[in-house]
Amino acid sequence: MERCCTIPVRFANDRALIMGWVPLSIPRAPIRRTWTHPVLKNLNSDSAGPEYRLEAQIGFKLRLANQKHLEVFARLMPDVTPTQFAVMAKLRDEGTISQNQLGRLVGMDAATTKGVVDRLRKKGLLQSAPSQTDLRRLDISLTEEGRAFADQAVITARRISQETVTNLTAREVDRLLDLLDKL
């Protein structure tokens, strides 16, 4: 194999890191999976055949599950939204962090994070200050009132999670969480 046609790569396994050379372009056939589940069976089909059932689709079921969870959340924690709670719970765990880092940790874009932080600041639950190390950065932390609220909210959040999965066994909950992590 000529070097001009190869690139160095690292292969890692559980025990060692191996350096090797592989061709620059490896011809590959398109991967065609054969699905057996009815929801996934006709993924490669361009037809909108009659076998499509909305009620059997993963997105539809995830939305219904999320709606149930949001109903429980709104009933048990009416003072904040789930995204506001996520921000407060993460600040409770992390302490003072930059607004940018906070958004990344809770999976929100910069604009959404700014809006959530602004609303919580107006409620007196968060405070912000210019970073001591980088003046372009804004550091966010809980106020004393915010810390007390977050401590109580975490207890309520456990009840929300329990009520959301009340029809599942402990084993089913573990399996569901593992499967959601894979998405």
Image (cartoon, grey):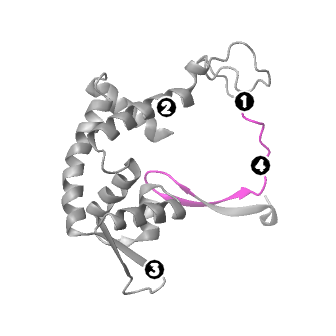
Question: What kind of residue is marked 4?
Answer: Ile
Indicate which label's residue lies in the foreground, 3 or 4.
3
Viewer-side residue, 93 vs 88:
88
Q: Which residue is mark 3?
A: 137
Q: The residue tagged with tag 4: helix, strand or loop?
A: loop
Q: Position of residue 164 (x, y in %)?
A: 32, 31
Given contact means CB atoms under 8 Å apart, are the residues at marks 4 and 1 in contact?
Answer: no
Write the residue at 31% across / 67% down. Answer: 126
Q: Earlier in the sequence, mark 3 or mark 4?
A: 4
Crowding near the residue tagged with mark 4, few <14, some 14–19, many ≥20 C-alpha atoms within 10 Å? few
Given contact means CB atoms under 8 Å apart, are the residues at marks 4 and 2 in contact?
Answer: no
Viewer-side residue, 78 vs 140:
78
Q: Earlier in the sequence, mark 4 or mark 2?
A: 4
Write the residue at 25% across / 63% down. Answer: 146
Q: Which residue is mark 2?
A: 62
Write the residue at 67% across / 27% down. Answer: 33
Determine the image quadrant of residue 31. Answer: top right
Given contact means CB atoms under 8 Å apart, are the residues at marks 3 and 2 in contact?
Answer: no
Q: Which residue is mark 1?
A: 32
Q: Earlier in the sequence, mark 4 or mark 1?
A: 4
Question: What kind of residue is marked 3?
Answer: Arg
How far apart are labels 3 and 2 at the CA level?
36 Å
First to last magenta residue range: 11-31
